[in-house]
Image (tube, rainbow, N blue to C red):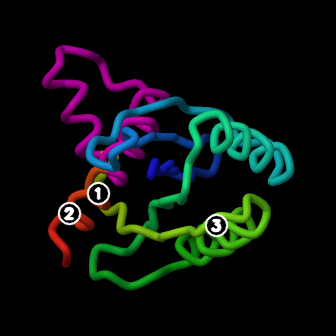
Amino acid sequence: MRYLALDLGDRRIGVALSDSTGTLARPLEMFYRSSRTADFAHIETLVQQHQVGALIIGLPLNMDGTEGAQATWVRDYGSALAQAANLPVVFWDERLTSVEAEDVLRSQGREPGKQAIDAIAAAIILQSYLEHLRSGS
């Protein structure tokens, strides 16, 4: 099964996709948010195009593991998306993924731009989830 991961932000959404075996994640794209209707339509197109079976959505937890206002918003958005796309949604801890994405870009000699960071952060979220599935934890 293929998974699609989303890194939801106030202005942008980073998107990553797993391979068909559910083993490896790769950045797919970043797009600018406009409205839920437009966002959901775009995500549903990606789901159909890549034959996705589940959505993994980064959950912005506080450093102590608690949920704040942004996590509440993400849960609301993700739940509405699950209904619209008729797919299961898993919320997955995204703490420090943007920092890790910046490190990845710098290690490649690239300047960390926000567009690249969002998609790479989504891939990091997804890879973490896939590794969790493989470990059976």
Q: Nearer the viewer, residue 117 or 18?
A: 18
The crowd level at tag 2 (other Cα within 10 Å; few <14, some 14-19, many 20+) is few
Give the numbered dot on residue 130. 1
> Dot 2: what SS?
helix
Residue 32: % across, % down: 67, 35
Do callouts 1 and 2 mark residues in contact (Cβ within 8 Å)? Answer: yes
* Main secondary structure type of the part rendered in magenta: helix
Amino acid on which disc 1 is placed? Leu
Residue 133: % across, % down: 26, 66
Q: Nearer the viewer, residue 27 or 108?
A: 27
> Dot 1: what SS?
helix
Residue 106 magenta-drawn? Answer: yes
In the rendered image, which residue does mark 2 sit on?
134
Give the numbered dot on residue 78. 3
Cα separation between marks 1 and 2: 6 Å
Stretch in magenta:
99-126
